[in-house]
Image: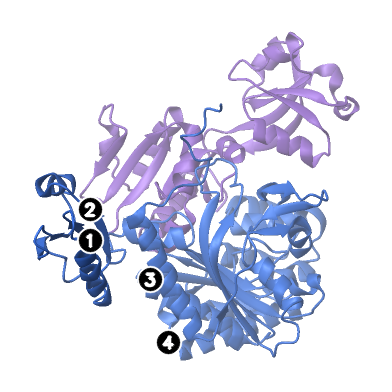
Amino acid sequence: MLDLTIALAKGRLADQAIDLLEAAGTDCRVVREMSRKLILTDEQAGLRFILAKPADVPTYVDYGAADIGIVGKDTLLEENRSLYEVLDLGFGTCRMCVCGPEDLAGRLDSIPNKRVATKYPNIARAYFEARRESVEIIRLNGSVELAPLVGLAEVIVDIVESGRTLRENGLAVLDTIASLSARMVVNRVSMKMKADRINPLIQSVRRQLEQAGRTTP
Amino acid sequence: MGQWQFHTPVGVADLLPRACAAKRQVEQRLRDVFSQRGYLEIETPGIEFYDVYAAGSDTVPQEGLFKFFDEQGRILCLRYDGTVPAARVAATLCREKPLPLRLAYIGNMYRYNEYGGGKQREFGQAGIELMGSGAPEADAEVIATAIEAALAVGINDLQVSIGQVGFFHGLLAEWQIGGEDAALLPQLIDSKQQVALDELAERLRLPARARSVMRLMSQGLGSETELDELAALVRHPQALAALENLRAVLKILDDYQVRSFISVDLGMLQSLNYYTGVIFKGFTYGLGFPLFSGGRYDGLVQNFGRDLAATGFSMGTSLALAALQRQGKKTGAWSLPVRLGYMTGQRKEALQAAAVLRRDGLAVSCDPISSVSAWLAQHPEGPLLLVNATGETVWLREADKDA
């Protein structure tokens, strides 16, 4: 039996992914054991889990270092790798939005060469390129909402969950770029070479999702 | 002075003797497979005019090309692939040659790699182009040659997926999808995004049978009988003709006795503007990427002034080597050459002895030495032959016989 390697995005997403995989009948005990190891192997089941930084999960899967990855759509959009995106897992839902001062609503394109602050430079660039607007991307690593407040940027591109942080800082959603949630991705070669192992896994997770009513069949 | 004199640029690497020998051996095996099937090797320049690639295909992204200028200010670029230059050759220098034209190439290609890095910017590729035939026999011949090529370099665990892009073009026409959706739909099918596909179908109010078609495409066909199932769900003549063509190619591949490697995947929809018919990809263990890929590109050669149907494939030679290594397979015989050392005054005898050994097929290098023990200590590995002070030849370490 060929080993299957699953890359999980460290953090909350990994916990939810493990819950889902277990509910779908995959033995995840090795991951549950508290450990600081980065690779967890269950030799009997022929399973390997690797715990990676979310932004690195698509890379591991793209190069075939992992066969399967579970990671947020935001990361997939930002990394833009050529992967199979086989399942929407339904958890970790939020939106990728363009945000800024409320008075910019509806007249975003009136500002030439806007400065856009973001943790997601590729998503931001692709969005404005599609609108044929030239922008200057300013890459930040956190608290992006600060940028328009101190005049570092006109708008930001960031994840919006409840919108509370935005409101408290006098900002509004100007446009939604994409709806986000956790996805299961598969390496293109693994899908062909390890179909006997991967397809049943996808099917059982899909059944589990349908039972839980989290996605349309 | 600069600080980079110890380094090679990003994405390129030195090949040391063992790896270099292994690569040459892979190349030689591919060369044999191609030439045995009547493909004539050509070598196109490492430098082309940018216009060649700009005219050749809109699938070559301009940011992927290494560009510079000639003395007249014209834009030049490094060879990005083997197919576009071969198309240029077929339409110009070879335009009087009888058809079909069978060309092969083996060489290094240069690409600024995709976002994310880690991929080589200089990499070996070997491939063939069969130009001047639109028949399914030509498609099948190229696919069978690709499989033979993989087997010849020692890759037996091989799966080949075959698709037909004409089927998708027929669907677009049948469902009357245009504009941005016509660009989005193939991406969603190709990356198997079922949920997004359902949403798109909903928004475009596609009929139920269209959704079944998209599902069959994105999930891949389990068996050939599903081709009939698919054919029953579509009406457009282009889509039906594409399925008919695919069936014909599969039937010929039966005659080549390579069907065991092949599965149908109509969801492969990359480079839709470039390919025009049957496309295929070859996969093996240990690689995250396809080992080879190819397909029919009937529109390319006419960009160079000659209307020629054409199909071909290319295989990464470095990729093939990486796959062999990761699968724990031998990458060709390797042995150190014989070192012949001679004591003072024995040069003539040594050179004669070396010439005799070379006639027997051994690789021999000659060096003058002053101390046998120091020479032995200096070369802990490989065969050593001494011509001593009295002119006798003595093996201090024998040459490997099975090498």
- For marks 2 and 1, give the one nearer the viewer: 1
Judged left or right of residue B151, residue A180 is right
Q: Colour of chain A?
A: purple
Q: Mark 2 points at which residue?
A: B368
Residue at disc 3, secondary structure: loop
Residue at disc 1, secondary structure: helix
Judged left or right of residue A42, residue A57 is right
Residue at mark 2 to residue at mark 4: CA–CA distance: 57 Å
Residue at mark 4 to residue at mark 1: CA–CA distance: 58 Å
Check whether the beta carbons of the residues at disc 4 and disc 1 lie within 8 A of each other.
Answer: no
Check whether the beta carbons of the residues at disc 2 and disc 1 lie within 8 A of each other.
Answer: yes
In the picture, the disc for residue B257 is: 4
In the picture, the disc for residue B347 is: 1
- Taking depth in this image into account, of A150 and B323 the one nearest to the observer is B323
Q: Residues within 10 Å of mark 1 (few under 14, many from 20)?
A: some
Q: Do labels 3 and 1 share a chain?
A: yes
Q: What residue type is labelled 2?
A: Pro
Residue at mark 3 to residue at mark 1: CA–CA distance: 42 Å
Q: Where is residue B403 in the image (x, y as percent from the top left)?
A: 21, 69
Q: Which residue is at 56% across, 26% downward?
A: B1
Q: What residue type is labelled 1?
A: Arg
Q: Mark 3 points at which residue?
A: B153
Specify which label sits upstream in the sequence, 3 or 4: 3
Q: Which amino acid does label 3 sit on?
A: Val
Judged left or right of residue B142, residue B336 is left
Specify which label sits upstream in the sequence, 2 or 3: 3
